[in-house]
Image: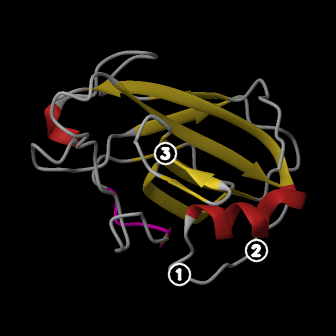
Amino acid sequence: MGFALSSMQLASSAFGAGGAIPSKHTGEGPDVSPALTWRDVPDGTQSFAVICHDPDAPLVTPGRYGFVHWVLYNIPASASGLSEGTAEHTQGTSDFGKPGYGGPMPPEGHGVHHYYFWLLALDADLSLPAGLGMWDLLQEVESHVIGMNRLIGTYQR
């Protein structure tokens, strides 16, 4: 599955691109999702999806790698961001085995991990069911992605 980055921009008031994610948004703090905003959305966008993935996590299964911290979708095209700790839209299942956001919590002493917050702009409102994991979501939306970009934050324990 291959995607190319678009000119769409994703940002957070909690941390800058490549910056450290505050403990408030991690498993060592209150563990609430950071606020996100986006702009320069492609024409024809009908909905969005957001994923947070840690490719540095030392987990590999056939065809998959890293650790999924958040899967959120069925976000309407009218949205230009997500509030901190949002409970809106449709929650998928993270690799914690539950719906909703689960913040960074890498193994102690494992060094800096990079957390990719992905924003996908879709050309359809797919009304997908709750509980999809990242890989299932990507399979469902692949042919509908018309724009994507990411914001990378870091965290270490």
Please give the residue where the numbered disc 3 appears in the rendered image: 53
Q: Is residue 44 magenta?
A: no
Residue type at the position of mark 3 = His
Front of the two marks 2 and 1: 1
Front of the two marks 2 and 3: 3
Do labels 1 and 3 touch, CB within 8 Å? no
Q: Which residues are magenta?
A: 86-90
Give the image quarter of residue 93: bottom left
Quarter occupied by the C terminus: top left
Provide the secondary structure element on which disc 1 rests: loop
Residue type at the position of mark 1 = Ala
Query: Percent from the top left, x then y, of residue 118?
Result: 58, 41
Mark carried by residue 130: 1
Provide the secondary structure element on which disc 2 rests: loop
Identify whether 154 is placed above or below 129.
above
Mark carried by residue 81: none
